[in-house]
Structure formats: structure tokens, C-alpha cells
Amino acid sequence: MTLETTRRFLEDLLLPAGAEALPIHLIASADDAALQALSEAERAWVEAQDWSGKQGSVLLLPGKEEGLGGVLLGTGSKDWPAQVPLLTGALPSALPAGDYRFASPLADPELATLGFLAGSYRFTRYKCLAILIRTDRFERDDGFVLTDTLDRSGRGHGVADENRCGKFQGL
């Protein structure tokens, strides 16, 4: 894969400028201007959750009617880009499916986006090869066959049937 092909593929993962998306606010501390710019209800929610801008902490803000209204990412300090340049990689695993945009000014928007995209990546190619000992088989309501297995440590895992490995991410 060439660099140009990779760049086009990555651009397909990004929303066009101005698209409707939930805001992600980067918060360094309790007195951060971005936190003070939130609505009174949002600030009350943050206080009720006892959330601070601790580095890597994520808080989902409720929407006005229902659902998600926005996201807070704690950076721990204003100089987070120099200390932890890929900190935004903590977001994907904490967020529900949806469209998101950075609402806070970024020192390096491309690096912040790269961090987010890198945090979205999951290497699952060899997960199904972890099947060592079959101990029980059962079917879920949707007909999807699971196999309960033990790994080398003796811990049990739900593993997809080998023929359907790519469709199950429950490991």
C-alpha cells in the first residue's frame, strides 16, 4: 500500500468540514476556559460526576433532550501535546458509535486526529487461533455459535466459531 493510497483511505474515515458531529472538549483542569464555556446544566453534570481534567479521563455529557450531547477529555495540563501527543487515542474505546469533532483548539490537529484513529484500531487477525480446548458449545438467540474455550492460563473465553471469527468481537 503506497502512502497516497493510505492517505486516501484515512481521509475516508474523516467527516467533511462542517458536518454535524458531537463536540469533544479537551479540559486541562477545573478552571479551564472550555469547561467554563459549557452550559450551566453541563457544568452541574460534571460537578455531580466529580470529574476532573485528569489525563485520559473521559466524561460523556447528556444531551438536551436525550442521548449524548458531547464529550470531555481530560488532558491533565495545557502542555499535553508535548507530554502525551497521542492522548486522543483514549477516546474511541470510551465513546459510543457516532460522529465526533474536536471542539477545542488543537496545537497539532493532524496528530490529534492520528491519535484518535490509532486508538480506534483493533488487531484481531489471530484472535480465533486462541482456541485450544473446547469445553462447551451453545447457540445464542440469534443463531450465532459460540465456543467456550480455555487459553494457556486456564481462563475461559467466549470465542467465535472458527468459520465466523471476523464477525465476533467479544474476546
Image (cartoon, rainbow, N blue to C red):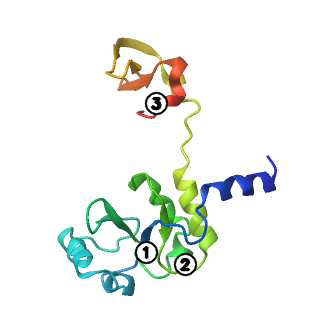
Q: Residue at x 55, y 78 (%)?
A: 106
Instruction: Give the labeled residue for mark 3.
Output: 168
Q: Secondary structure at mark 3?
A: loop
Is residue 75 among the parts visible in the rendering? no
Between 10 and 51, the one nearer to me in the picture: 10
Q: Is residue 37 placed above or below 76 in the rendered structure?
A: below
Q: Residue at x 43, y 14 (%)?
A: 133
Query: What number is the disc on residue 26?
Result: 1
Between 53 and 120, the one nearer to me in the picture: 120
Instruction: Give the labeled residue for mark 2.
Output: 106
Q: Residue at x 58, y 65 (%)?
A: 113
Q: Secondary structure at mark 1?
A: strand
Would residue 21 be found to the left or right of residue 118 on screen?
left
Q: Amino acid at mark 1?
A: Leu
Q: Position of residue 51 (x, y in %)?
A: 26, 70
Q: Earlier in the sequence, mark 1 or mark 2?
A: 1
Alpha carbon distance from label 3 to label 1: 33 Å
Q: Residues within 10 Å of mark 2 (few under 14, many from 20)?
A: few
Q: Secondary structure at mark 2?
A: loop
Q: Residues within 10 Å of mark 1 (few under 14, many from 20)?
A: many
Q: Amino acid at mark 3?
A: Phe
